[in-house]
Each structure stands twice: as C-alpha cells, then as structure tokens.
Image (tube, rainbow, N blue to C red):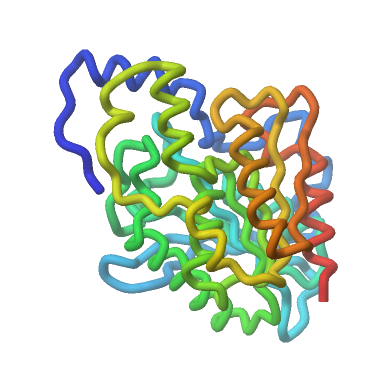
Amino acid sequence: MQLPALSGSIRLVIVVGLIALLGSCHQPPAAYQPASSSAAASAGDSAWVGRNRQRLYVQAYRNTQVSAHPVLVVVVHGDAPFNKPGYQYAFAKQVAAKHADVVAVGLLRPGYTDPQGHRSAGIRGEAVGDNYTPEVIRAVAGGMAQLKRRYKARRVVAVGHSGGAAIVADVLAQYPAAVDAALLASCPCDVPRWRQHMQQLHGGAVWEQPVTSLSPQALVPKVSRTVPVTLVVGTADSVTPVRLSWAYWRALHQQNPTTKFVTLAGLEHEILFAPTVHQELAHLLQIR
C-alpha cells in the first residue's frame, strides 16, 4: 500500500521517529567482518527472479564446495527507511564463505533500490510496516521457489532481519512449502502492536494510517508444525522490542516445539552480523 502524500510536518515526524530503523547497513560492522570472509565463496552472481510486477533482483554467492543439490539460504533485508539496502548481499556472502554446500542469496525486496541502482518491481511503501502486503509476500515466496529450482536446492533456509523477518514469517504461513527453516532477527512480528509502539515512542499520524500488511502473529495457526524457526532479538532493541518476538515465539511454540527463542544481551536492533546469529543459522543449516 502506498500512503498518500504527507505534509512537511508529518515527514519531519517520520525522520525523527524512524531514524533508529536502520536495517540498511551496506556493509557489516567492522567487528563482525571475518578476516577471510570471501576465501571460500564465489563472487556474487547478479540475477533476477520473477516477472513483471514480481520481478526481484538478487545476488547469489556459492561456497567453493557445492554439490548438485545444495542448501539455499535466502536473506531478506529490513525496511531501510533512509538508505538503499545492500547488507543482505554482504550477509549472504559471509554465509556462503562459512558453510560448505551452500548457495546464499541476498534478495532485494519489492519496490526497493540497492546501492548499485538495481530496483525490484513493486511498491516500496513508506517503511512504516505498510510493505508486508499479500502482493509482496507472494513475490518473495515466488522468488524463493524460482531460486530453489534454479540451484536444484534440497532445502531452503530463509533469513529475515527486521521488516524482512516479518516478511519471512508471513511466507512461512502463506506459502509453507517455500521454506524448510527460518531465522527471524529483530522481528516486528505483531505488526499492529509494533506500529502502536512506534506511534507511542515517536508520535505521528503516519503510524495510524490503515495498512494492508499481513501480521505474522495473526497467521501463527497457518505455520507448519514441524518447520524449524529461530527468533533472535537484542535485549536493548528499542525498534522491535523483545516482547514482540517473545509473543510470536510463545504462540508458535505451542504448536511447533522446534521453535527457538534467543536473546542477545545488551544489543540493539542491528544484530544480523552478530556471531550468535551466524551460530544459530549454522544449527538450522545442519538439520537434515
């Protein structure tokens, strides 16, 4: 959903209210960069998946040891209110370098433009939780399915950060055959509660505008009872507070005991490159 034109005062509120919503680092923090992050991974393959309104840009990285049927990891970035997201590619490259028999793909969400100027089809929205629509979920799920066929993958592990985590969680519910395991980092899993939190925290009528986004919390009954799901959140995250991930985990865990909840003490919203996130992803990759 594309929100109507906003006044200067409301746009100022958005700037103040969303400045914490980074979710768009073009490179991982220096502290999280492994010394040999590219030693075991190929250069990124620039490619497109989907057609017309569902055409999405991706960058794919292969581990140097890849079988005929590797594990596919698909990384979905956050809402990126003020920047052009490219960190999904950097994370995918790290994953491919760390894990044998893996093809890792950074996916550019519908309507977004990356730092190199590639643009995925679709409506970007205003980065206020209005971009998790059925159309977006369908495009992302379709892209995952096409990538699975392209690389003849035996399993698909989806990784979502911030708004990307909400999208991955929605894919789990709406298209359960698309994903075999998922890692959700800094998830605004209850979209109405998250938007209310942001409105209370920063103010602004933009948070009260109606949206057509799908909320993962409301879709829990549709998620497979066997798909492994891990939620990771920083205890100091003021953007997507722990309680949002906890509530989603608690509801999902009641029907799916494989669901896991991990907190990172003292960390804020930008946790995707944290060592613990890589460790939790490694556990998901090892599942047969």
Q: Is residue 9 above or below residue 232?
A: above
Q: Position of residue 161 (x, y in %)?
A: 58, 45
Q: Is residue 258 above or below residue 21?
A: below
Q: Position of residue 230 (x, y in %)?
A: 72, 53
Q: Residue at x 26, y 40 (%)?
A: 210
Q: Is residue 74 above or below residue 145?
A: above
Is residue 233 shown left or right of residue 198? right
Task: Report the label total.
Answer: 0
The quarter of the displayed image where residue 122 is located = bottom left
Q: Residue at x 21, y 13 (%)?
A: 9
Q: Position of residue 21 (x, y in %)?
A: 49, 28
Q: Is residue 138 above or below residue 36?
A: below
Is residue 117 shown left or right of residue 247? left
Q: Residue at x 58, y 23 (%)?
A: 238
Q: Report whether residue 198 is seen.
A: yes
Q: Residue at x 50, y 59 (%)?
A: 219
Q: Report whether residue 118 is seen.
A: no
Is residue 166 shown left or right of residue 50? right
Q: Position of residue 222 (x, y in %)?
A: 53, 68
- Image quadrant for the C terminus? bottom right
The quarter of the displayed image where residue 101 is located = bottom right
